[in-house]
Image: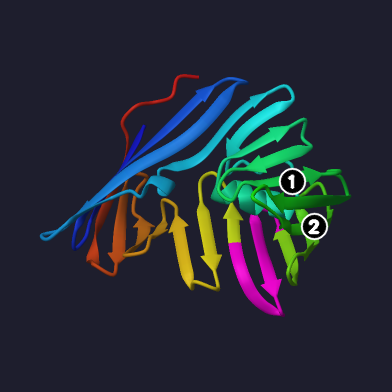
Amino acid sequence: MLFLSDFTGTLKNEFIFDLKFEDIYETNFNFDFESSENEVRLSNVDNIINYFKFDQAGFEFSYRNPGNRNDPYFLIGNFNSFSMVLDDYFVLTFSDLEFGIIFQESLFNMSFWTKATDLSQSKVGLTIATSNKLGISLGFEDIMKFYFRAGDLLFSLDDNTLDSVYILNKDFSLVYNASTQSLLIDSIYFDKNEENFYFRIPVTKNLFLTYSNLGIGISFYIELLRENN
């Protein structure tokens, strides 16, 4: 368990937990609260879990666990909600109740997706990708979109303009949505939510100088409980 505390214009504390049972499940979640003179803000429910994976032969239940998959619709759906995968082939994402079939995961693959509640809202993805996570995809939905992937970075273009950006990483998450102009970042060195941002410059392993829209301060990053190997 890790503890991150920011002392700026307010006091922000975050507890980070890593749980793992070998070959069965793995998860990381955090809970934070931010206090000022007038209010106390707690973590939103959808921001508590950083990632989750329950994996057995022929079955996977996961959240923000891209694995070796390259299909952009799976990557975005799994980033935004829990997904159930059967035989690495059939997928159900729970936020929009989307059902998907990924026909092949190799240099070239194709996927078909539709909403369980509205079969008319269907889309098809065509992807060319390498084993080192470099790829390009065409998404055929109400309009055609282009998706580009380089390692943990995935971004899309809509009518030649930037539509969305994701960083698919267990230790650093980022999501940008052009339609809502929202940007959320969660990492040790930079943290941005709907209200505030924190930029942390390391002085030592456990001490940071912190710049925030709330003011300048310091942060402490402490390991409270060590994982047993």
Task: Name the spot of residue 52 as percent of width and height, x first.
Answer: 54, 35
Magenta part of the protein: which range? Answer: 150-165
Residue under circle 2? 125
- Nearer to me, 44 or 1: 44
Residue under circle 1? 100
Q: Earlier in the sequence, mark 1 or mark 2?
A: 1
* Left or right: 165, with 158 as reference point: left
* Left or right: 228, with 164 as reference point: left
- Nearer to me, 205 or 116: 116
Residue 157 is a magenta residue = yes
Is residue 63 positioned above or below 147 on the image?
Answer: above
Is residue 210 positioned above or below 63 on the image?
Answer: below
Q: Hey, what amino acid is under mark 2?
A: Gly
- Nearer to me, 8 or 62: 62
Task: Name the spot of residue 210 as percent of width and height, x first.
Answer: 30, 60
Q: Quadrant of residue 146?
A: bottom right
Q: SS class of the residue under badge 2? A: strand
Q: Residue at x 71, y 80 (%)?
A: 160
Whether residue 67 is visible: no
